[in-house]
Amino acid sequence: MVVKSLKLNNYRNLENTVFYPTDGINVIYGSNAQGKTNLIECLWLFTGGRSFRGSKESELVAFGKNQADTELCFQTREREQTIKFEIQSGKRFPILNDVPKSSLSQIVGSFCAVVFSPDHLTLIKNGPEERRSFIDGAICQLKPTYASLLGRYKKILGERNALLKDIPHHRELEDTLDIWNERLAVEGSAIAEQRIKYLNGLTVPAIKFYEGISSGREKLSLEYKMNCHANTDMSRSEIADAMLLSLRQKQSEDIYCGYTTTGMHRDDLIVKIDNMEARSFGSQGQQRSAVLALKLAEAEQIGEIKGENPVILLDDVLSELDNTRRNYLLKKLSGMQIFITCCDSFIEGKNIVRIENGKIIS
Ligand code: ATP
Ligand code: MG
């Protein structure tokens, strides 16, 4: 997959910009606060995902303007495609190949990218939610129907939670709770099955990349930990049974709390380095290497499963790596289109553009 052009108008501090990148490495450099991360963020949004900075859509529009317009033209194996966004009134309206789409989920899977910025360290550092969304986001790019599965689970969870809040005032409603338990277990086990399958494919390349990044000094391991008494060797129906049992066992506690304390929305991906949990015991460098290994593995998986490499977005990453790691990373990503931001143009001989005050200067 290759970006052919990016057009922006009133996107954050990028006023009226057209960018024609090269197929290989694109280095975007400039002083602080010029718009480098804004450009990477904008490219990422065409995957249909949310801003990796956690920004709301309204924050993407330039200060004092009502609307931002962005347009990406990219080449896939089959054909050239375009995605346009009109961002206004706190919403992002997608148009895929000139056909307006009613939701972002309808464009997910069209343009595939893997992004890595210093913010992604939270993937290891923060709670399980970040790791679940890493897995879910990765699966969505490969299998867009997975987004509707997640949506269904979220809806059922919301309805069960609303019921849990009502039960203390209307005890007779407690009898209806088991319907929601069963529905959650069915959808939850389908999600767990997809996550386990995805992680089974991701683990081997992630271990390989971590080994390469750490020059063979340390070993990475991944483990999907379910919140109910189920394990990753179980079949989908066995996982559903375990989830249902757990929901029933926790029913009184859930009524007391007013929300659902068990289910796949509480699962976690445990990342270990030399058998110790990276979140609690990993150094900054080890955590960064673990995220990098996961992201490289994600890119490789997309390439293998879709038969087409994703676009790689590296925001402020290279400056934090030593020369050996930097060279290893670029070698592993060769053959993919890469966008790298940094404060100086230390990579020579590639397409280098400078950003100054929201303007791209070639
Ligand atoms: P650094 O090297 O420090 O990471 P950068 O070039 O990546 O800098 P960006 O994060 O892209 O900088 O931000 C550039 C500028 O964009 C910031 O100064 C910020 O104030 C501005 N900015 C952010 N959102 C908006 C917006 N909605 N409208 C106008 N300007 C904005
Ligand atoms: Mg930046």
Image: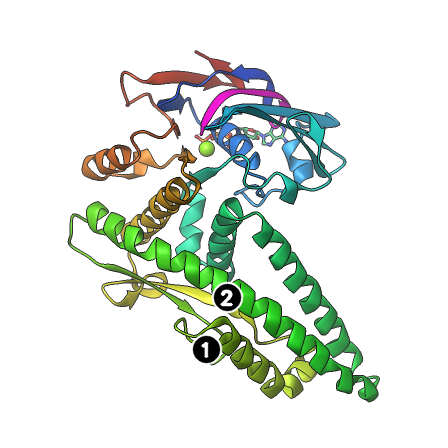
- The amino acid pointed to by label 2 is Ala
In the picture shown, does residue 113 fall above or below 213?
Answer: above
For the residues labelled 2 and 1, the Cα–Cα distance comes to: 10 Å
Q: Residues within 10 Å of mark 2 (few under 14, many from 20)?
A: many
Task: Identify the residue under disc 1.
Answer: 230
Q: Nearer the viewer, residue 100 or 49?
A: 100
The answer to whether residue 256 is left or right of residue 344 is right
In the picture shown, does residue 167 fall above or below 259?
Answer: below
Specify the quadrant of the image occupied by residue 60: top right
The answer to whether residue 348 is left or right of residue 76 is left
Q: What is the x, y in percent for residue 248?
A: 62, 85
Specify the quadrant of the image occupied by residue 196: bottom left
Name the residue: 15% across, 52% down.
216
The answer to whether residue 194 is left or right of residue 90 is left
Residue 259 visible to the viewer: no
Q: What is the x, y in percent for residue 180?
A: 70, 75
* Element under disc 1: loop
Mark 2 or 1 closer to N-term? 2
Question: Main SS of the magenta segment?
Answer: strand
Name the residue: 39% across, 58% down.
199
Q: Nearer the viewer, residue 40 or 295?
A: 295
Q: Residues within 10 Å of mark 1 (few under 14, many from 20)?
A: some
Name the residue: 64% across, 75% down.
260
Q: Is mark 2 within 8 Å of ligand 2?
A: no
- The amino acid pointed to by label 1 is Ala
* Magenta-drawn stretch contains 73: no
Residue stretch in magenta: 1-12
The reply to whether the C-beta atoms of the residues labelled 2 and 1 are less than 8 Å apart is: yes
Residue 192: mark = 2
